[in-house]
Image (cartoon, helix red, strand yellow):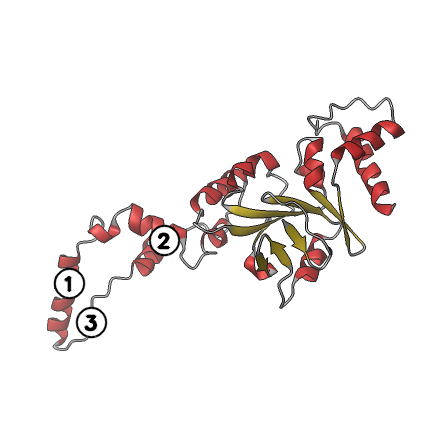
């Protein structure tokens, strides 16, 4: 179950993904910022600061440094067996440290292997690489923890629901988007959509209602309701207009 306290007075079913459509996503995020818990998922309460916010301008270097445990650092140090001295020979380096102190005549130098500093100075990570579908999916695989992580995907239109459905046991996803039709792939997905309008979230609880309204208004409507054909712009526009009408009601 999920409840967004600023907009809802009741809980809704939640299986790891919801989509919130808003004309102004940036303003919506500002409104959700609070010192108090704003989102309830199951028996847990969260602030927006408890979520990792990812958008198309998120850089890969920021994504991998977002955790204090730094999964990239752990991969390099542990997976590449640095601690087993495959890369550096501690015995030789300690000897060099002794030679430095003998040369100076004082305990001036200390051998303190810091792998994070070593990584920083011998690897040059691309500071300007933005995430894409492939790198985001790879990150979701790499960042799995025992407890669920909270993710906000802000106008990330290159990810579809089918791309992340296998990760709902590891993450709580909230899509914030200007256009939910960039994300959903069939009309049943509409039941995951909330439309923000004048401080209220309108939940499409039953896609059959939307389908009924579509055919009631336009009996010639031909689009296959099981699969959204993204190139059918006119049909998608009809659906959006009908949903907006339902909101105003």
Give the mark nearer the N terminus: 3 vs 1: 1
Q: How far apart are marks 3 and 2 (CA)?
A: 26 Å
2 and 1 marks in contact (CB < 8 Å): no
- Dot 3 falls on a residue whose secondary structure is loop
Image quadrant assignment for residue 184: top right
Q: Name the residue under label 1.
A: 94
Q: Name the residue under label 2.
A: 73
Select label 2 or label 1 by which is in front: 2
The C terminus appears in which quarter of the rendering?
Answer: top right
Tag 3: Cα neighbours inside 10 Å, few (<14), some, or many (≥20)?
Answer: some
Q: Name the residue under label 3.
A: 109
Q: Can residue 124 be seen in this view?
A: no
Could you say which is closer to the camera, residue 93 or residue 115? 115
- Single out the residue that lies furthest toward the bottom: 106
3 and 2 marks in contact (CB < 8 Å): no
> What residue sits 50% from the left and 50% below the top?
148
Left or right of residue 214, residue 5 in this image: left
Q: Where is residue 161 in the image (x, y as percent from the top left)?
A: 61, 37
3 and 1 marks in contact (CB < 8 Å): no
Give the mark nearer the N terminus: 2 vs 1: 2
- Dot 2 falls on a residue whose secondary structure is helix
Tag 1: Cα neighbours inside 10 Å, few (<14), some, or many (≥20)?
Answer: some
Could you say which is closer to the camera, residue 20 or residue 111? 20
Q: Where is residue 145 in the image (x, y as percent from the top left)?
A: 43, 49
> What residue sits 30% from the left and 46% below the top?
79
Where is 165 relative to 91, above or below? above
- Dot 1 falls on a residue whose secondary structure is helix
Q: Distance between the residues labelled 3 and 1?
A: 10 Å
């Amino acid at each position: 179950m999920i409840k967004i306290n600023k907009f809802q007075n009741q809980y809704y079913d939640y299986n790891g993904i919801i989509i919130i459509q808003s004309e102004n996503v940036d303003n919506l995020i500002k409104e959700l910022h609070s010192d108090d818990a704003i989102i309830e998922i199951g028996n847990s309460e969260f602030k927006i600061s408890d979520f990792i916010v990812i958008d198309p301008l998120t850089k890969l270097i920021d994504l991998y440094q977002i955790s204090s445990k730094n999964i990239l650092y752990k991969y390099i140090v542990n997976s590449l067996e640095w601690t087993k001295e495959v890369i550096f020979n501690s015995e030789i380096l300690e000897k060099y440290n002794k030679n430095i102190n003998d040369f100076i005549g004082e305990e001036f130098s200390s051998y303190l292997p810091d792998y994070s500093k070593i990584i920083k100075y011998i690897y040059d990570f691309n500071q300007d690489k933005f995430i894409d579908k492939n790198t985001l999916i790879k990150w979701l695989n790499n960042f799995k923890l025992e407890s669920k992580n909270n993710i906000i995907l802000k106008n990330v239109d290159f990810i579809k629901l089918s791309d992340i459905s296998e990760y709902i046991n590891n993450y709580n996803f909230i899509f914030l988007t200007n256009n939910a039709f960039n994300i959903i792939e069939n009309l049943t997905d509409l039941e995951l959509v909330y439309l923000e309008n004048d401080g209220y979230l309108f939940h499409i609880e039953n896609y059959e209602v939307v389908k009924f309204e579509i055919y009631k208004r336009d009996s010639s409507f031909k689009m296959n309701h099981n699969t959204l054909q993204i190139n059918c712009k006119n049909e998608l526009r009809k659906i959006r207009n009908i949903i907006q009408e339902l909101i105003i009601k």
